Image (cartoon, rainbow, N blue to C red):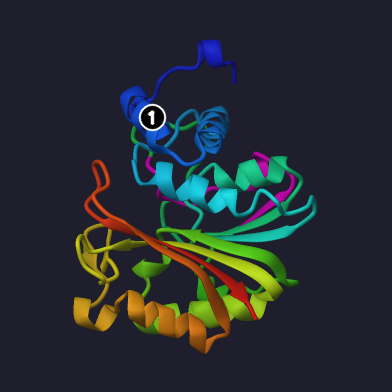
Amino acid sequence: MSKGKRVRLACDLPDSDLALALSTAKRPDLLRSLVETSRDAFGFFPNHYPDTISYPWITERLESLPPAARILDIGAGVSPMAVWLAKRGCFVETVDSHQVVRSLPATDDWTGWGFLNYHQLHQNITSHHCAIEKFEPARNFDAIYSACVLMLLTRKALETALRNCREWLRYGGSLLLTIDLVPFSDFLWNRAEGREVEPLLRHGTIFDLMHQLKTVNIRIDQLEVVRVIKNSRTDLLLVSGTAV
């Protein structure tokens, strides 16, 4: 897609928001690359400001992986990360169970939600339209990541997903999670597209998530909370772990 002829979609991140994100980003080069990748692939970068934080944070921790590394994206939705990684020579599998199936070209009403078959964008990507509990990989991964999706599972389903992640990761592999939080609290966000997943007290906290990771032998290397995010109903938890 020619940048000079690109038609601006209503769902695209406004230039003013992008300028603000670039001015505060730890890796503005990565953010700019992801935005360009997204606009070239889909015609837009999702108008969801927290993505300007979580996407570069994840890709920064994956950019050192060698070509042919195997990576799993859980709950991929419509995101530039799989395409960005594939263009670097990685082999990416995406899993998403969303009932909305996206077909390019994108229209003004698109969001970051929905299932998209990424293989049409790059031959190194294989997409699976299924729930994560139904997914059965053929071999282990060097890294697994999920951007603001796993907290949408029930607590029991999350425990199963984390156990599976450890099983699917090679020893020393990376698990990278961004998790929405109830603002100014340690509670995991418990609403999915306006629907309550389960009561907040049952859903769990940061400390419950840390315990779950430890139980399945994921060592936590970094844990950071980002508060007061522009145009966001939630705060953001960033978790980097290693399979041990």
Question: Could you tell me residue 69's position as x and y percent?
Answer: 75, 57
Q: Nearer the viewer, residue 212 or 148?
A: 212
The quadrant of the image that shows the N terminus is: top right
Magenta residues: mostly which secondary structure? loop
Q: Residue at x 54, y 37 (%)?
A: 34
Using the rendered view, name the quadrant where residue 237 is placed: bottom left
Question: Could you tell me residue 144's position as x and y percent?
Answer: 60, 64
Q: Residue furthest bottom?
A: 215
Under mark 1, the amino acid is Leu
- Left or right for 92, reference 145: right
Q: Residue at x 25, y 41 (%)?
A: 230
- Left or right for 120, reference 96: right
In the depicted structure, whether residue 95 falls above or below residue 27: below
Q: Nearer the viewer, residue 212 or 125?
A: 212
Q: Which residue in the protein does label 1 denote?
A: 18
Q: Residue at x 54, y 41 (%)?
A: 80
Which residues lie in the magenta part?
Answer: 111-128
In the depicted structure, whether residue 183 falls above or below residue 204: above
Q: Does 121 appear in magenta?
A: yes
Q: Residues within 10 Å of mark 1 (few under 14, many from 20)?
A: some
